[in-house]
Amino acid sequence: MNSKIIIVLDVSSRRDALRLVEAMQHQAGMFKVGSQLFMAEGPALVKEIVNLGAKVFLDLKFHDIPNTVVHAVLEAAQLGVSMMTIHSSGGRAMMESVSTSLQQRFGRERPMVVAVTVLTSLNGESLREVGMDAAMENQVRRLTLLARDSGVDGVVCSPLEIELVRGVAGREFKIVTPGIRLEGQSANDQQRTATPREAINRGADYLVVGRAVTDSPDPSSALQRLIESI
């Protein structure tokens, strides 16, 4: 098993999700349940995957007022997930409330929380369109420091910002990296991508891998090739 690999379950049915989990459970460290699958099958499927002995990364990117997000993450933690996402742009109060509440309720058994910096689908022009005039690197640096100082476990950033995040946040701060593509594969709707080896060499703790593996007719073999490429 490669504990650094998180496989994306971007499917819409329990059957398809469990097929991927069963095929790769002994190779991947975690499985990501995002908005698509969660809306299709709900919390029950998250529990089912956990009960199979697989770890779940719940990627719902909570972003709301602190009280609302705290209640959401406490419910998520009750499902037995190993890691979940919030948005760093939700601010210090939101992130601090999440960190404190999880620690108080679950202590050492609490799931990890990682804060999304800037989505990998965005580029500099996209940031300007929504009123963020800072350069991409400066925005990621600002949100990383805010997340670290607010007590969360790490951030989600593109492969291009891994070294920046590691430099400002330190060795223990976790880095989760989407936008992973094998050599020659399409970037699809993501703007900032890298190969698995590049991301690991830059210092990523976890690689979020989706279509690069799950679109293959044989996902297990595709994942094995990816693991061997690191």
Image: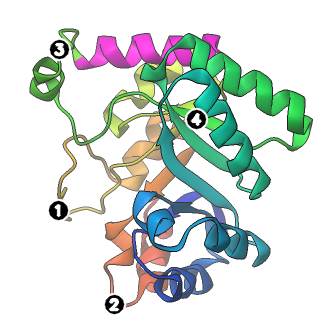
| Amino acid carrying mark 3 in the image | Gly
**Residue pointed to by mark 3:** 131
- Please tell me how many numbered marks the rendered image carries: 4
Q: Are marks 4 and 1 in contact (CB under 8 Å)?
A: no
Q: Nearer the viewer, mark 4 or mark 1?
A: 4
Q: Position of residue 149 (x, y in %)?
A: 63, 10
Q: Nearer the viewer, residue 217 or 147?
A: 147
- The mark that comes first in sequence, 3 or 4, is 4
Left or right relative to 75: residue 19: left
| Residue 78 visible within the image | yes
Residue at image point 78% right, 22% down: 100
**Residue pointed to by mark 2:** 217
Q: Position of residue 38 (x, y in %)?
A: 50, 64
Q: Is residue 155 above or below residue 80?
A: above
Could you give the CA–CA distance between mark 3 and mark 1, rounded to whole angstroms?
29 Å
Q: Secondary structure at mark 2?
A: loop
| Amino acid carrying mark 1 in the image | Ser
**Residue pointed to by mark 1:** 186
| Amino acid carrying mark 2 in the image | Pro
